[in-house]
Image: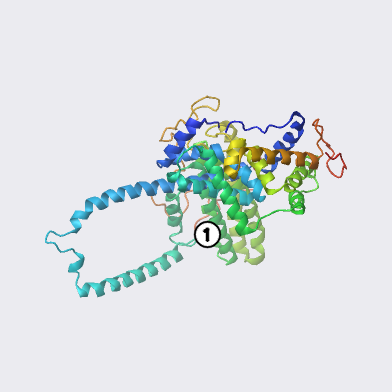
Amino acid sequence: MDDRMIDLAAGDARLRQRLDAYADARLTPDIVSTARMRARVLAVAHRQADLARADAALTVVSQTALPGAIRTDGRSTRTRRSARSRIRRPMTALLAAALVLAAAAGTAFAARPGGALYEQRIWIETLTLPNDPSARAIAELARLDVRLREAEDAARAGDSAGAAAALAAYARIVEAASEAAIATQDEVAVAILEAGVGRNVEVLRALALWVPDGAADAISRAVQRAVERAVDRSDRAIERIDTAGPANGGHGGNGSGGSGTGGSGAGPDTPADPTAKPTKAPTVAPTPKPTKEPNAGPTDPGAPGGQGGENGPGNTPKPQPTPKRTPRN
Amino acid sequence: MTLDDAAIERLVQEARDGDAWAFGLLFDHYHLPVYRYIASRVHRPSDAEDLTQLVFVKALEALPRYQSRGIPFGGWLFRLARNTVIDHVRTRHDHIDLDTASGQAGSDAGPDEVTVARLEMDEVAVALAALTDEQREAIALRFFAGLSAREAAEVMGKQEGTIRGLQFRAIAALRRQLRIDESGTGDDHVAGSGGRIG
């Protein structure tokens, strides 16, 4: 892209200045939009790369498997299928489908907030999180949104245990996600989380105000305690991000807001080859995934229990001020 | 991030071989000009974001078929962007007129935000909206996206001279609309100032 400057006459410097200002103010995506676009595009790129690799592997497998499919006596296995097995197969499939459906229905019921399988469901979600820090931050925000919806639905239905369980899960996800974002030193991921969690704090506060009107006193108290705890965790996460964020400035950021997948480890002032690849294995692991299936209760002694939503004595969180800043440029 | 043509070609090759990291670098290099071009054509930031993303996804899918036969990757990408915008405008009937441009630009302004700078932005938006489609596109490609006249000509499927003509007339119209005279002294008092024309 040489000759990229418009050959404006000298007298048009003013016009150029105004067009520049306009482009900066109205035609430039903020860091969160950039991160969102980048994460989605890279998610497609990774998926495409994975599919290509899988296709290649499948081609190799099918080529090696093909000779074995033909029997040595010249009759394929397909021609030997009896009429009886042709009837039996759809019946088996139907039975299997019915069983799967029944199991899924039961599982879905048990996996509701406060249900026996809820914690397992939360844990399974962590297995599907992407590795790219900014994509991961977006996925974590999506999980947080789901928790909020679950809490709201449960509170609306008068299910205080469910709401408390959803909010406890929310608090744990906020903590883990912010720790991971700080650890990966990805400023885009940090910005995404900060903006998303900041927005959620407002939703949580609205939830706390809304619950007492429609619910019984005990339910209100339990849900409010859980809301306060979630707000407290969110605020603490934002504080941690704020304090850790500036120290990480420049890592992995390249040009106009891209996260620079993984970060190369070179300082921001290092004039390196811009296309030089980062080392494949990151030195800091992303979000620590649970090594085994967690038990139903949360590990934090003060956290509201999966069923009861009780706080430890003397551990009542105070309402915190609204988040300090929302990153926009 | 600045990349020279050789580095871009290398990244394109690696991306074509399934290297998502290389495609990420291409995204970092091109997303701002592409976004600016699209945003100047569709006006809604959410649409601009969606379409920018779509352009890169389309590029990713079409990359195996991309061959650098005299057309640099940037030009190819902008052609994709242009087609995507045209499709979008055609299906959504997304267009903007003068009233919309000025209304949209100032619609979310609170009392504290109504500043001279904001009014100037609105004025530029209105001036751009008053250009013909081709003039506006030439300005978007040349100025907001930073393409050369030759690249802009390739993207728009026109001669380089035609682009320069469009650009010349667009600049003259913008200057008139924004009351900026030849010497470069503009009328800084933007709202209802009744400044000089021409």
Which image quadrant: the C terminus of chain A?
Answer: top right
Number of disc labels: 1
Tag 1, which chain? A
Residue B195 vs residue B38: left or right? right
Instruction: In this rendered view, identify the residue nearer to me: A85 or A77.
Output: A77
Q: Secondary structure at mark 1?
A: loop
Residue underneath mark 1: A308
Instruction: In this rendered view, identify the residue nearer to me: B103 or A285.
Output: B103
Q: Position of residue A243 (x, y in %)?
A: 60, 35
Q: Position of residue A307 (x, y in %)?
A: 50, 60
Q: Is residue A312 above or below residue A238?
A: below
Give the image quarter of residue B65. top left
Q: Amino acid at mark 1?
A: Gly
Instruction: In this rendered view, identify the residue nearer to me: A213 or A289.
Output: A289
Residue A320 visible in the snapshot: no
Residue A251 visible in the snapshot: yes
Residue drawn at x 75%, y 28% is A10
Residue drawn at x 65%, y 58% is B93
Residue farthest to the left, as pictured? A73
Instruction: In this rendered view, identify the residue nearer to me: A145 or A295.
Output: A145
